[in-house]
Amino acid sequence: MSKRNIFEEVEGSKSDAAPQAAPGMIDRGRRGARGAIRGWLMALFALVVAMIVVGGLTRLTDSGLSITEWRPVTGAIPPLSEADWQAEFAKYKQIDQWQIENKWMQLADFKSIYWWEWGHRQLGRVMGLVWAIGFIGFFVTRSIPTGWAGRLALPGLLGGLQGAIGWWMVSSGVTQGEGMTAVASYRLATHLGLAFVILGVIAWYVFLLGRSERDLMQARRAKEAKIFGLSTGLLHFAFLQILLGALVAGIDAGRSYTDWPLMGGQLLPPNPLMIEPLWKNFFENPGLVQFIHRVSGYLLFAFAVVVWLRGRGSAHPATRNAFNLIFAVLSLQILLGVITVLYAAPWHAAILHQLVAVGLWVAILRGRFLAAYPVATSIKDH
């Protein structure tokens, strides 16, 4: 047997060769249809924003109680004949809103408010359908990235809960003999609050899917924890202010005092605690509710200045720009709030105020996301 030099190059078959590392292994098997799913989520986001706008217009036109039943499936078909319309109108005539405020209405007037509420509910059905078709389609084709199935199911589950809360809200005003002519303001706040939660979930997923898993894993190591924590606090504070705004809208408190910065010529509105029991003033006293919303807005702005100054100190240009945007949008929102008060909450100002609230919400989320996952910038990019 001949001896072989231990340093002799041995030629093996290709199967014996050591496996070579392939690039992109982190993303392989996890990628899925990230781009398509992101586009689908963006469509859902747009539908939720449309729901908020249509819901606001439904409230401003006092149309929310025109449909007195919750029929998630059969309610998709509107009245198709004169007899159907008369039947719906007869149901509306039984509730307090018609008995106390709208006895002047004829069928044509009823139809105008009915279509607003029907359109709002129909948009919710469309949104549920878009989510279901997209989720099932991506699931069946195995296009969902690893670990994302539960995340993508969440907007659908929250949407179903939102429909139930919507009826819980409407049912508070569908009363007979209780003197209720509108929905309960705290239920309206719950309904709007959940809409913003759904928007936040969808927006966060859109941000995540806009970058690869490899990029996110690397960026996470550079997380700016202090800025992330402050932006989280700002997000919660903004959410509280949105809920307070819903309480204002629910009782038309924005039209109770139309001077600024004083209220009725004084710092505190007259008779801020006139309702018994005491706690009801914080939900049903128009002057006190508007006052709380104003003061909360001032405090939110002060805290936002602190967060903005900290965000400007970020080492990453994209993060700094995100916090500049937050400050700009919040400043615009406060200006719109003052204009809305001074002009007694006209519908176009009220809706614009609501839309800018959506913009502020997304801007804060984006700043928070970039604090958690900074975008790396090379020296030559500065």
Image: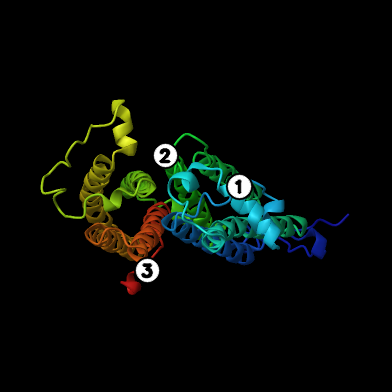
In the figure, residue 338 lies in which quadrant?
A: bottom left
Render colour scheme:
rainbow
- Which residue is disc 2 drawn over? 186
* Residue 47, horizontal then vertical, whole percent: 55, 62
Snapshot quadrant of residue 378: bottom left
Instruction: Answer with mark 3 or mark 2, whichever residue precedes in sequence.
Output: 2
Under circle 3, the secondary element is loop
Q: Residue furthest top?
A: 277
Mark 3 packing: few (<14 Cα in 10 Å), some, or many (20+)?
few
Q: Is residue 369 left or right of residue 265?
A: right
* Residue 126 spot, x, y in % from top left: 64, 60
Q: Which residue is mark 3?
A: 378
Is the Cβ of the residue at disc 1 closer than 8 Å to that at disc 3?
A: no
Which residue is nearer to you in this view: 91 or 251?
91
SS at mark 1 in the image? helix
Q: Quadrant of residue 131?
A: bottom right
Q: Nearer the viewer, mark 2 or mark 1?
A: 1
Say which quadrant the N terminus sits in.
bottom right
Q: Secondary structure at mark 2?
A: helix
Tag 1: amino acid:
Lys
Q: Residue at x 59, y 55 (%)?
A: 121
